[in-house]
Image (cartoon, rainbow, N blue to C red):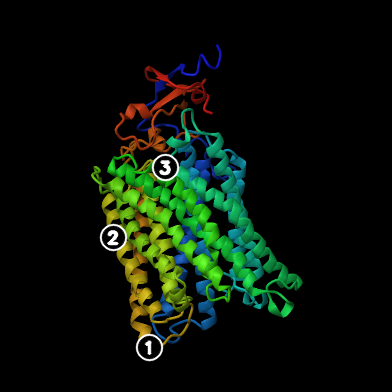
Amino acid sequence: MSTQETNLKKIQVQRYEPESDPDKHYLNEETGLWAWMTTVDHKKIGIMFLGSVTFFFFVGGILALLVRTELWTPAKTFIEANTYNQLFTLHGAIMVFLFLVPSVPAALGNFILPLQLGAKDVAFPRLNLMSFYLYLIGAVIAIVSILTGGIDTGWTFYTPYSSTTGGAVTLMVFGVFIIGFSSILTGVNFITTIHKLRAPGLTWDKLSLFSWSLYATSVIQILATPVLAITLALIGMERILGIGIFDPALGGDPVLFQHFFWFYSHPAVYIMIVPGFGIVSEVISTFSKKHIFGYWAIALSSLAIAFIGFLVWGHHMFVSGQASLASMVFSFLTFLVGIPTGIKMFNWTATLYKGSIQLASPLLYIFGFFFLFLVGGITGIVLGSIALNVHLHDTYYVVAHFHFVMVGGMVMAFLAGIHYWWPKITGRLYNETLAKIACGIIFIGFNVTFLPQFVMGSLGMPRRYFNYIDQFQIYHQISTIGSYILGIGFVMIFYYLIKSIYTGKKASPNPWGSRALEWQINSRPPLHNFHHTPVIINGPYDYHKPMDEFQLGLAESGGNGHGTDIDVSSPEETAKGE
């Protein structure tokens, strides 16, 4: 039969309803410590990443509480100035490189992406495991650097201080260097998986927006991370070999380091936040039971953010002496990157409009995200204005803006994703009442912590200062109280999520009533995700279609297919999964 004759042939599929309480799942098919250490199952690797980033999040959080406690009084409270410098440096480095960058892509992305694509695993399973061990090796080296001398350069490692000061800077940048390779390998894996392992019928216009966000993030990881690796390698060479690259005493240029560093680190902001945007799209559509408004606008805006993000690094350097024309161009591009982000906000709001809204805890975290990220975005526009930036540069205004974007935006989206997919990952339901209370505590604690810092910054309080004048004490004290409220909220989340693993009610395969593919299989999925080959005829947001149209597949030899046969008209290339 020719290709033309079969262009609209019928393929025979079956409906596969997920089991409510499966005997076999990915957690009990391969057991034991060695099985976990050598696993190539994307789900287990995702859980190992999740455990690791959670550990480092709490380490970074404790360091932040120590910093805030020290700032309770204008002079020394309980630690020395040099120790204070090390604490805020380690807080920043651990939170950025060991938590924010890998949290959504490496943890949730690893677990969920193949499920949303109808794939058995990622494209390169062994490379996936290697990326986890590279992350772990880099993290261990970073911890050793803390124990063998510490670093006090700030998480940005600005030269010439970082290339001339004592301490374990060389060891720390080597650790971050290795972690960067983990990020690159994850990006390569995800792009290949999305291109090559989509289920039959899963065309680009049926791809979930979480998958689109991971695709855009992977592009940034592959293109930007090598620049960071080269930059950190140059610092190591300058410290070890005495080569003059950034140190003016050796004929180097310290501003060159800033160009190199921010060329990576501003796109890195989008490595952190763009996957969070994908989570927002999934949660909003599920809990409003509506097709996402402006699907292509949201999908392409992720790619637009990835592209424009490479062009705005100079807005970190308005006071570095760069040319006025360059500053004007970077300022314009900074305003421009707000457009695709604004497109997302308006489309999410339009999706909620007249939706059948279910106020479950994941959606409440997204509502918190809306307010906090909006404040972070608007204050980013303020900092993108050259005249205002000159006044606000290196003040607490920048600290507050960064935390509103990263914690208020990315971490709130991450928490929404954890709560949303927790039943799928663990097969258990958490205490919904405690989840809502914790969400409120975190929202209040965050605002109490960081809103006063906008006031401090606009009044001229510099960041990273150990001592400060008395007029700022009330703002610091309010901020410190807020940080402890915030900490209580995070401890609450950890408590009820861990408790749910042991005492939580068993989760049904689809407790939220979602149409996305990952919810059409067992909660605690099988080792290889699907006992069949999924066939996709609808998009993940088609809530006007009946549920049984989202559970179709082709039987595999040795599979446990069940249900009645269904004929589906499908182009030949769709049937082949091309």
Q: Quadrant of residue 259?
A: bottom right
- Residue matched to label 3: 296
Name the image quarter holding residue 11.
top left
Question: Residue tagged by mark 1?
Answer: 470
Disc 1 versus disc 2: distance between alpha carbons?
A: 32 Å
- The residue depicted at 48 percent of the width and 51 percent of the height is 304
Q: Identify the residue under disc 2.
A: 440
Residue 138, x across and y down, in percent: 61, 59
Per the model, the C-alpha gap separating discs 2 and 3 is 33 Å
Mark sitting on residue 16:
none
Element on which disc 2 rests: helix
Question: Is the Cβ of the residue at disc 2 closer than 8 Å to that at disc 3?
Answer: no
68 with respect to 183 (left or right): left
Give percent across and percent down for residue 297: 41, 45
Report whether residue 570 is seen: yes
**Nearest the eye: 320 or 550:** 320
